Amino acid sequence: MKILMLTPYLPYPLLSGGQIRTYNLLKKMADKHEITLFALIKNEQEKQYIKELEQYCHKVRVFKRSSKPFTLRNILRTAISSYPFLVIRNHVSSVISAVRQELESENYDLIHAETFYMMPHLPATKIPVMLVEQTIEYLGYESFAQTTRWQFLRPLLKIDINKIKYWEKYYWQHCDQLVTMSEDDKTFIASEIGETTPIDVVANGVDTAWFSEQKFAKRKVPTLLSVGTFKWLPNVEAVRFLIQKVWPLIKRQRQDIKLWVVGNAPTDEILRFAARDPQIEVSGRIADIREAFGGAHILLAPVFSGKGTRYKILEAMASGTPIIATSTAVEGLGVVNREEVIIADTAEAMAREALALLADDQLQARLSHGGRQFVREHYDWELIAKRLDDIYQRVGKKDNARKN
């Protein structure tokens, strides 16, 4: 089957959840389908990674968007446009003509768009369009607007969030197939749009073999871990909550302990936390994420907003790292409290559970074993790719039936 895929990022290197997801699915689908990838890049240096993706794609084309989001041009365009800032900063007008030309020159069976804000790049077409929503964007921005310390921004944010909500729902209703990351996301979207669009779940996955093939020694000092790219607002909120609310409660009881914060593009605020507290270590991006999961004793994931990717949870389980997380952090995964993870929804509960778990080797071993077994049975990339392939076959066959 011939598929045209559009992504707002180049799916390599693996710096974000979206890149991890797309890269692994491309690898698994390469032998089954002929996929042409159109991706946005921020700078010319990213072109060095095209070769890696050409192993799995029939063709790869990249299109440069603004390297920095908050340019005067993007702000002014947003002010006069019905589109939100999220669409404007990811919009490249040349993509529309390139897609149109591609569709005219090749006989495609399906268009696969990652994120709703790639949809404005599509010209009118009879080829079925599958939209994959890695998260529900407007919910994440609503949470940020409610908690931001910059009160003067809230009216402007409200206007932009209303735009996001309008266009996100619009494209949910105007694609041929919608894909979400979890049953919870599916249920939420269905409640918003009714039965206008078929919705299926293709969850995120993990390469269980890769995470288990190499063992890393745990640090001698008891280490609590936080993982997540800081270009995603819920991760910034989570670390802020962890350091300001949870960490002081833990330190009151134990001094022989470290907090290790790992993630691409740490903010200045997070770096300042580490500068003020020698027991906090911020590593930013590390070359092999298995080093973080293997070296830490517990992953703490106090996520309170955002939907979609749950890579830190899946990767920690695949690594055998015990997890203490909020209900939101594990929402939709189907985990059982105290079997695969420990759920704690307040700072007091998370601190209490972390201290108890550090002192309980037997519970650590049970969570480690339960997590590994759970991801092997439910979230290995082989299983996830099979679900995506089933949707490709079903939606693509509908198009072939119409053609015949």
Image: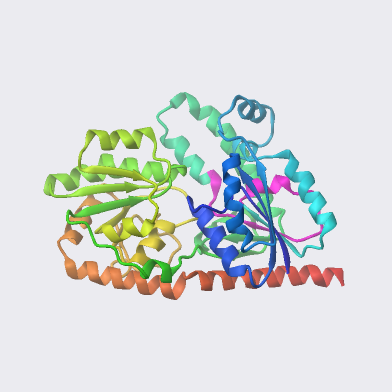
Q: Does the stretch in magenta take in 60?
A: no
Q: Would you say residue 128 sits in the magenta stretch?
A: yes
Q: Which residue is more in the foreground, 341 or 146? A: 341
State whether residue 246 is above or below residue 21: above
Q: Is residue 17 left or right of residue 31?
A: left
Identify which residue is drawn at 61% across, 27% down. Answer: 75
383 up-or-down from 41: above or below: below
Quadrant, the C terminus: bottom right
Which image quarter: residue 394? bottom right
Image position, residue 330 (x, y; %): 40, 59
Where is residue 186 shown, x and y percent of the image?
56, 61
Which sits in the foreground, 239 or 332? Answer: 239
Q: Which residues are magenta?
A: 115-138
The quadrant in which residue 55 appears is: bottom right
Q: Is residue 382 above or below residue 58?
A: below
| Residue shown at 73% from the left, 62% from the top | 110
Judging depth in this view, the residue of 102 and 153 nearest the camera is: 102
Q: Is residue 322 left or right of residue 61?
A: left
Residue 307 visible in this rendered orientation of the protein: no
Tell me if residue 339 comes above or below residue 103 in the rendering: below
Name the residue at 86% across, 68% down: 403
Instruction: Kindly identify the residue that appears in the image at 65 percent across and 69 percent down.
Output: 391
Which image quarter is the N terminus in? bottom right
Looking at the picture, how far across and down is residue 35, in whole percent? Answer: 69, 62
Residue 326 spot, x, y in % from top left:
34, 54
